[in-house]
Every structure is written in C-alpha cells, then in structure tokens.
Amino acid sequence: MNKNNPVGWFEIYVEDINRAKGFYQNVLQTSDFITLLDEQTKMVAFPFDETKPNISGALVQTSSMKPGIGGTVVYFSCNDCAEEESRIEINGGTLLKSKFNVGNYGFVCLAKDTEGNLIGFHSMQ
C-alpha cells in the first residue's frame, strides 16, 4: 500500500487573481507567492519547500474554468484553525462554519473565499 500523501497539486479557480491573492496572503499570513505565467492563464502558486512533505497548488484565473461551491474543497493545514478563522471576514471572505471538532482528526473551520470557493482550515488543536 502506498503511504504517500495522494494529493500532488491543487488549483483554486478565481475571477480576480489580485483580490484572491490578497485574501490568501492575509488569512494564511504569507507573502511568498510564486508567479507562474501563461499567455491565457494567470497563476500564482502558494509557497512551497521541495524538501518538505506537504503539497502546494495555485490560484488560477482563466476563462475556461470558474470558481464556486459544489466541487473540490481544499483544506489548509495550520496550528490552530481559529487563528485563520479570525482573519477570514476582515479580508473579504465569508465564514460558513466556525471551528468544530472532527474527533480524532482534530478541528476544522469552513469558509468561502473572495471568489466564492469553499475552503477549509484544519488543525489538531
């Protein structure tokens, strides 16, 4: 059985790349986004360290894909998701479900980002 993390990359589709980037920078408290250029698609990758086990992904603005609730949910790992939760609404997002217990798997809060995507924050405390 393969014990590696099965997710290798994710993309969050957005309408406004700068607005979305600002939201994630402020909520996740990071400014190290990596600009990936393409003629038809605007992309900024979340920071990553190739020597660490977690995966990364990107915010993507393209005419071929649209953001919204009803598809994939990306969960961001954090020390205490209550901290990220406190920064969601002041940065233009919507808190959908405040921090709640998921048993042996820790805690989660759910939000809608500035582009209408459903996202989650996960912590063990």
Image (tube, rainbow, N blue to C red):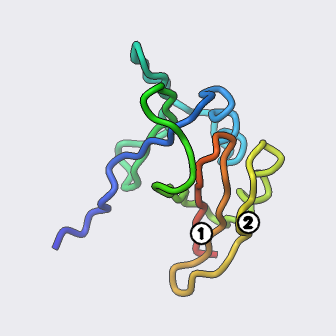
**Number of numbered discs:** 2
- Residue 82: which disc? 2
Residue most extreme to the top: 39
In the picture, residue 37 is in which quadrant? top left
- Quadrant containing the C terminus in the rendered view: bottom right
In percent of width and height, residue 83 lies at 74, 60
Up-down relation of residue 44 to residue 24 (above or below): above
Q: Nearer the viewer, residue 68 or 6?
A: 68
In percent of width and height, residue 66 lies at 51, 37
> How many other residues sit within 10 Å of disc 1, few (<14), some (14-19) or many (≥20)?
many
- Mark 2 or mark 1: whose residue is earlier in sequence: 2
Residue hosting label 1: 123
**What amino acid type should be assigned to the residue bearing mark 2?**
Ala
In percent of width and height, residue 61 lies at 51, 28
Residue most extreme to the right: 90
In the picture, residue 91 is in which quadrant? top right
- Residue at horizontal 36 percent and vertical 46 percent from the top: 9
- Residue at horizontal 42 percent and vertical 29 percent from the top: 64
Marks 1 and 2: in contact by CB < 8 Å?
A: yes
> How many other residues sit within 10 Å of disc 2, few (<14), some (14-19) or many (≥20)?
some
Question: Would you say 66 lies left or right of 98 here?
Answer: left
- Residue at horizontal 36 percent and vertical 55 percent from the top: 53
- Quadrant containing the N terminus in the rendered view: bottom left
Instruction: Estimate the spatial distance between the alpha carbons at disc 2 and disc 1, rounded to whole Å.
Output: 9 Å
